[in-house]
Image (tube, rainbow, N blue to C red):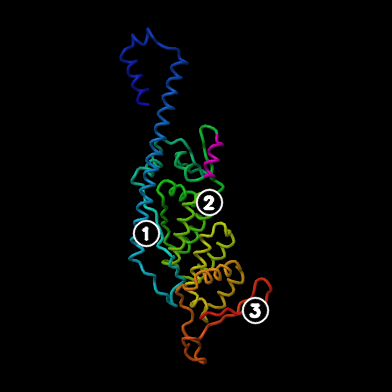
Amino acid sequence: MKRARLEAGQNRIHPSASHTTQPSSFSHNKRRASSRARDMDEAEQQILHEYQHARARVLHEEILKAEASATTDSPPCSSSSTPPSNPPLSPPKMPVDNSKLGFHSALLTGEYSDLMITHGEQQWKAHKVIVSSQSHVLAAEIEALKDPPTLDLTSHDHQAVGYAIEYLYTANYVTTDGDSSLSLALHIRVFLLAISLGIPGLEILSASKYRQNLNQQVTDLEVYFWSVKTIYEHTTPTHPGLRVAAAEAAVTELSMLLDDKMRARFMQITHEVPDFQADIYVILLLHPSRSLDIVPELCNECGPRGPEDSYSIVMECKGCGKDKVLAFN
């Protein structure tokens, strides 16, 4: 574009030369189109180079942060007065916000934009190289678009689409809703959108945010039970991120969920969502040495629990319907 402006300026300074050697209108327009295409190619290459450099920097910082957290963090203590807490097996790797590197500002200003993304009346001036490199689904849709390309995502959840676009440009998304139940639902919707659009990084991030929100903010067990039913209704074992987070929360707080106050409700949920119950069993089988706080004492009539006493619960088999006894040491 700079070359085109320079040539235009030279023609204004030397009108006589332009008059004597002026090319045809078709040839002049062809050179200008070629110059614009060459400049756009260079812009896309520059954006791609900066994007790849930023991703490498984010990954490096994530690794350093995870290593530092692994040496300093300790798992929280379980308490019967708290909602299901679910300390992950490893510290959550929250992507570093790289908006300072210019990608988010490029989205806001529309600089070098070659793709329009719409949802209803809202529009984003995006960039093919950034969107396509992170989503094979969107890459295929963009490839099939006619110029000028406009990608319509109106059929998807509006709020989740906004957070997905934010993630594509910053490797993160930030929620502002203070209601923990609404935030939990939002992370589930973002997770489902990530699966639909084929954005693996967003799928991992939204599951991590769900887990963190469940651990630190949820105070109502009914909110947790609602999320369990929603997750298992709309996801499959192929994308287990949310299922694992929900089941691990139950395993971690199994003693609380099986006490007199919550047992009936918890059993109702496991009966209504058999896959949830199965995932709890799988986690218990795969991690037999995992530290669990499971009923430290028997009832008052039976007396205190001895070191070799076991705890057993009766569960209905989902296959044959017979009652089966599960014993825990």
* Numbered disc 1: secondary structure: helix
Residue at image point 53% right, 49% down: 198
Residue 81 locus on image (x, y percent)? 43, 77
- In the rendered view, tell whether residue 259 sits above or below residue 228: below
* Magenta segment main secondary structure: helix
To which residue does mark 2 refer?
Answer: 157
Residue 46 pos. (x, y %): 38, 36
Mark number displayed over residue 66: 1
Say which amino acid is labelled 1. Answer: Ala
**Label 1 vs label 2, nearer the camera:** 1
Q: Is residue 279 placed above or below 159 in the rendered structure?
A: below
- Upstream in the sequence, badge 1 or badge 3? 1
Considering depth in this image, is 285 or 21 the residue closer to the camera?
Answer: 285
> Percent from the top left, x then y, of residue 248?
49, 68
Task: Give the magenta part as a residue range.
Answer: 136-145
**Tag 2: amino acid:** Asp
Residue 318 falls in image quadrant:
bottom right
Residue 215 occupies quadrant: bottom left
Inter-mark Cα distance, 3 to 2: 42 Å
Single out the residue that lies furthest toward the right. Answer: 320
> Mark 2 falls on what kind of element?
loop
SS at mark 3 in the image: strand
Labels 1 & 3 near each other (Cβ < 8 A): no
C-alpha distance separating marks 1 and 3: 44 Å
Q: Please give the count of numbered marks on the rendered protein.
A: 3
